[in-house]
Amino acid sequence: MQSIAKVLSGDSLGQPVGVHGWIYRTRSSGGIVFVVVRDSTGIIQTTMRKGVVSDAEFELASSAGIESAVEVEGTLAEDKRAPGGLEIRASKFSLVAPSEPFPITEYQSTELLLDQRHLWIRSREQTAVTRIKAAMLRGGREWFQENDYVEVTPPMITGVAPEDSTTLFQIKYFDRIAYLSQSAQFYLESLIYSCERVWALTPSFRAEKSRTPRHLAEYWHLEMEAAWIDNDGNMKVQEELVTAMIGRAAVDCPAELKLLGRDAADLGRIAPPFDRMSYEEAMASLQKSGFDTSWGSDLGAVEERALTKERDTPLFVVNYPKELKPFYMKENPDDHRTYKNSDLLAPEGYGEIIGGSERETDNSLLVDRLREIGESLDNYQWYLDLRKYGSVPHSGFGLGLERMVTWVCKLEHIRDATPFPRTVARVYP
Ligand code: 4AD
Ligand code: MG
C-alpha cells in the first residue's frame, strides 16, 4: 500500500498501485461505482467496474457508507474529472471495517460539530490545521536548536500564580491546595542559571469565564527564557522564532494553507524586523480612530483588532503601564510609569499572540509588588531566592500556540486551532 499523496505524484501512472484509508464519498453510475478514498495525505478517486472486480466486491463497494475503512488495488490512470487528475481503476476492493451512518453530514450546527469533535477532526479542514500546527512547531524547534536553547520540562502542578490570580484553576493536591500552571515562566527563570537559554512547550490553564473567540481554558504555551538579554533582544528572538515557525508551515504545507484560504507566499514574505509602537502611541492612534481610551486603559480584542486589521505583518506594542501587567516585569528606566515589556499582535486583526518582558532582578522591588497585590510571600520564597544568588539581566516570553494557529490558518474561532478545545462550556469529548 502507498500513501495517497505518493500515488497522486503520478510516478506509477499505468502501473499497479494500492491504497488504504476511509471512504470520503461514493457515487454510482450504471455499472461503475466511484469511491473516493481519504488517507492522512489526501483523497483519490477509485473506480469499480462490474465485471472487472468480482460481483461480491462490486456489491460491497456500492453499499459501503462514508468513513468505512477500505483497501483498493488497481491501475493508476489519468482522469481529468477526478480530484488530482488521477484515478485508480480497481481490480480488487476490500472492506476492512464498515461504518455505521456517519453522524456528520454537510451542513451542521457548531454545537453538533463540537459534540462530535472526535469524528469531526477527520475533516479535511481540521486535518490541515493539525498538519500546519505540527509544521509550525517543527520550525520553532529547529530555530531553538540552531540557537543553542535547551528544551526543558517544567511542572504543571504549582503553588504560584505568574498571571492574573483570578484565572487560577485550583486542585485538591493530597491534603493541600495547588494550582494548574498558568505559565512555566518562573520555572524557566530558575533554569537559566544553569542552562542560560531555555524553552518549553507545555499546556497552560486559565479559568477564563468569558466566552470569546480567542480564549481557551487549556492551551499550549511555547515559552522561552534567556539570561543576559534585555527586552530588545527578547523581541528579536520573538520575531525570528515567529518567522521560522510560519516559514516552515509555508514550505511544508502550501496545499493545507490553500485549503484554508491562506496563501503560503504571503506568509513567506513575513520577516524581521516587525514594526514597533509604544503603548502611548497605540493610545493616540486609537483615540484618533474615535476610541474612548486613555492612559491606563487595557488593550482588549477590539482595540487590538483596530490597531492591526489593515496590517499584513505582526506589530509589537511596547512599554505598557505597570498597572496593566504582572509584578515580575522590569521597570522602564526611561519612563517609570511603564515596564520593559511587549505584546506581539498578529496582523489582520487577530490580536495578541505573545506576551514578553525583561524581568525584575531586584529582590526588594519584587517583595514590595507582591505585598501590594496581596500575595503570600511564603509561596514565592523560592522565586525570590533567584534574585539572591547571582541575579542577572534576563528576559522571556510566552507564545499562545492556538492564538498563532488561528491567525496563520485564518480561523474564526480559537477552538478550531486545537482538536479537543476546553472552554468554559465544554469538557466533552
Ligand atoms: O500574556 P500571557 O498571560 O503571558 C504569560 O503567561 C507570561 N508569563 C509568559 C512568559 O513570559 N513566559 O500569556 C502568553 C500568551 C498570550 O500572548 C496568548 O497568546 C496566550 O498566551 N494566552 C492564551 N491563549 C489561549 N487561551 C487563553 N485563555 C490564553 N491566555 C493567554
Ligand atoms: Mg498577555
Image: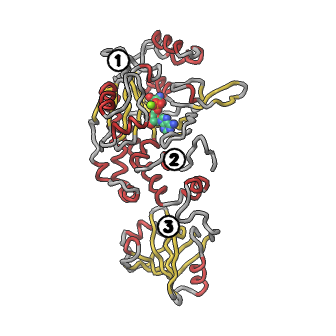
Q: CA distance from mark 2 to mark 3?
A: 24 Å
Residue 415: mark in rendering: 2
Asked whether the viewer can see residue 92, the reply is yes
The numbered disc on residue 332 is: 1
Upstream in the sequence, badge 1 or badge 3?
3
- Helix, strand or loop status at disc 1: loop
Marks 2 and 1, the one that precedes in the sequence? 1
Residue 402 in picture, x, y percent from top left: 47, 43
45 lies left or right of 240: right
1 vs 3, front mark: 1
Task: Establish whether ligand 1 lies closer than 8 Å to the Cβ of label 2.
Answer: no
Q: Amino acid at mark 1?
A: Asn
The answer to whether residue 422 is above or below residue 32 is above
What kind of residue is marked 3?
Arg
Find disc 3 in the rendering and name its residue.
Answer: 38
Q: Residue furthest right?
A: 175
Cα separation, mark 1 vs mark 3, equals 55 Å
Q: Residues within 10 Å of mark 2 (few under 14, many from 20)?
A: many
In the depicted view, which residue is nearer to us: 296 or 177? 296
